Amino acid sequence: MQSSSLLLAGGAVAGGLSVARAAHSFGSDTIRVGLIGCGGRGTGAVTQALSTVDGEVRLTAMGDLFEDRMQTAFRTIKSKHPDRVDVTRDTRFVGFDAYQKVLQADVDVVILATPPGFRPLHFEAAVDVGKHVFMEKPVATDAPGVRRVLAANAIAKHNGLAVSVGLQRHHEARYRQCVAQLHGGMIGDVIMSRAYWNGSGIWVRPRQQNDTELQYQCRNWYYFNWLCGDHITEQHVHNLDVINWVMDGFPVEAQGQGGRQVRTGEDTGQIFDHHFVEYTYDGGAKLISQCRHMKGCWNSVGEYVHGTRGYAIVNKAEIYDHQDNLIWKSDAAVEQGKGWQQQHHDLFAALRRGESPNEADYGAHSTMTAIMGRMATYGGKVVRWDDAIHSDIALADFDSLRSWDDVPPVLPADDGSYPVAVPGKTIVV
């Protein structure tokens, strides 16, 4: 377990990028990539890695829990980059040990894009064998997982391994320019922020005939906390991360409320459909956070920062004074999805220069910010950072999973429903 002082020290540069020298500079050499987790995000991440410039990148190994997901990903990636896929039948792996086989293959960089509950295990294993890493957000679903990532990342930094995290707003010019203006004092001292991910929801994957319980949950992973962490963690982490970046740290406490108003049908597992959290940062500044999955409601995805001399709409890269006069606007082009691609351009360019950028500490702290918010809404009480980060409540033992006949950490009741948090009763810390 990491000490509180070490965790706090990492948070002091929550928006910053740690860059060290790598043990090896790739220069113009081919960089070989392995993919662990072949769903939509893994497919997209590999496609973006193979689209980088200034040198050749090749996909050489793939692994997933499900054969059909891996085959679909293979065909999709091959259709977009037919000359950059060197994956053979011998380097396509299926099962709970597929990640180990990918890591043992001839790869320099591994992309971790499984459901996030597996992330700490896979990241630790990648670091242990000296691989550079791109891992999707969030980096864990519980506090023990966050601590495991932070501990592994200390080794990664010591060994000169690059670690990129899929919080792509850090790589978008408009966000970077706007945050720089805020850090430069354009709106004065920050008093309050607002962050939103209010949308209509996400896919559902119904139970298939002959599925074991573990197979069903892993396919429909978004709706089970041990795999997903709830949408406040899996999705809203993007917006919470932006505010941590602006604040150059993470909150010291949170309180909030949430529940399941419309997410009550079959195949909706455990997660809430709405969360409202009030976070407090050191010094007293507040963050008002909303995330919702409901159709027919007001939708908003973005971040707002209010200061003593004005306010910023960060996602639009615009800053106003208190009379609503526009006083600054980014001159960078608006390019939808550019951050997803740019983060791979930045990672692979750094590797070719012999640098090891490392984003895992702020990725872990932003993940923990989201988890603390979930703790607050599930428990209905004030949750403090030091208590949250040191919680020993683990949602699953991922190291012990070996086969589809294993028993998952949550099981349905006789009526098919799954355990759902009850504020005021559920123990979260």
Image (cartoon, rainbow, N blue to C red):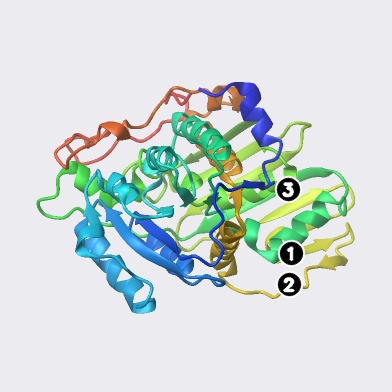
Element at badge 2? loop
Give me the residue at 88% from left, 48% from top: 188
Q: Residue at the left extreme?
A: 210
**Label whose residue precedes the other's in the sequence (3 or 2):** 3
Q: Which residue is label 1 attached to? A: 317
Q: Which residue is label 3 attached to? A: 246
Please provide percent x and percent y for residue 206.
23, 56
Please provide percent x and percent y for residue 34.
37, 57
* Quarter occupied by residue 6: top right
Local packing at callout 3 (Cα closer than 10 Å; few below 14, some 14-19, many 20+) is: many
Q: Which mark is residue 155?
A: none
Q: Nearer the viewer, residue 379 or 151?
A: 151
* Quarter occupied by residue 259: top left
Give me the residue at 78% from left, 68% from top: 330
Q: CA distance from mark 3 to mark 2?
A: 19 Å
Q: Which mark is residue 332?
A: 2
| Amino acid on which the number 2 mark rests in the picture | Ala
Q: CA distance from mark 3 to mark 1?
A: 13 Å
Asked if residue 308 is positioned above or below residue 150 in the image, the reply reads: below
Please provide percent x and percent y for residue 21.
63, 47
| Amino acid on which the number 3 mark rests in the picture | Val
